[in-house]
Amino acid sequence: MLSRRMALSLLASASAVAASGTALAKKKNHHNGSALLGDKIKQNGKHKIHKAGKVDVSADVRNGKVIGLSATDPGKGNLPVRKVKSRQKLAEASPGLVQAGMQLAQATIVYYYGYWFDDGVDDWYYWFPADVVIVDDSWVEYTA
């Protein structure tokens, strides 16, 4: 037979395990990279566009196109940045997450292109329209 103390201990342990599972979920931060970059898209070079927590985020621009994004953590150094694409518009004109439905333009599907990195705590996404990135086969489909 279980004593009251043992039952409470088991209940507390089960609660701690359940709570730790929810604590592991990462927040997805979506930003409009074009809005953050602004007129710097017209200047070649590396431009700081955002500070994601303690990570400095910079866009590399060449000939009016974003050719790469870098994320530098002061303690960890350069973080790996991956390229993703989505049919959903995940960032509006102002920075932040505003999720919209699929965009269709005259029977053609519009893709949005983003750079993604994980800072160990959250996921960070910076989205750009197709006309300001170099579109090739290296972009992988974004999955929520």
Image (cartoon, grey):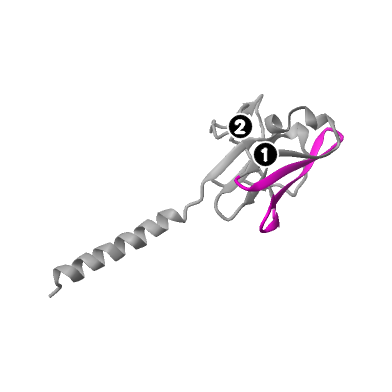
Q: Amino acid at mark 2?
A: Pro
Q: Earlier in the sequence, mark 2 or mark 1?
A: 1
Quadrant of res 14? bottom left
User: Looking at the rendering, which quadrant does residue 76 occupy?
Assistant: bottom right
Q: In this rendering, would 57 be left or right of 134?
A: left
Looking at the image, the residue that sits furthest to the top is 106
The quarter holding residue 56 reads: top right
- Identify the residue at image location x=24%, y=67%: 9
| Residue 80 pos. (x, y %) | 69, 55
> 77 left or right of 63?
left
Residue 114: x percent and y percent? 67, 41
Q: Which residue is mark 2?
A: 95
How many badges with numbers are in the image?
A: 2
Which residue is depicted at the point 41% across and 58% down? 21
Q: Is residue 14 above or below residue 27?
A: below
- The image shows residue 67, relative to residue 2, as above or below, that is above
Residue 106: percent from left, percent from top: 66, 24
Q: Nearer the viewer, residue 123 or 109?
A: 123
Residue at image x 35%, y 59%? 18
Q: Main secondary structure of the magenta part?
A: strand
Q: Nearer the viewer, mark 2 or mark 1?
A: 1
Mark 2 residue crowding within 10 angstroms, few (<14) / some (14–19) / many (20+): some
The residue that disc 1 covers is: 50
Instruction: Name the residue furthest bottom.
Output: 1
Q: Secondary structure at mark 1?
A: strand
* Magenta segment: 53-80
Q: Nearer the viewer, residue 77 or 96?
A: 77
* Residue 16 visible (yes or no): yes
Image side of residue 105 versus residue 63, left or right: left
Q: Is disc 2 in contact with disc 1, using a CB cutoff of under 8 Å?
A: yes
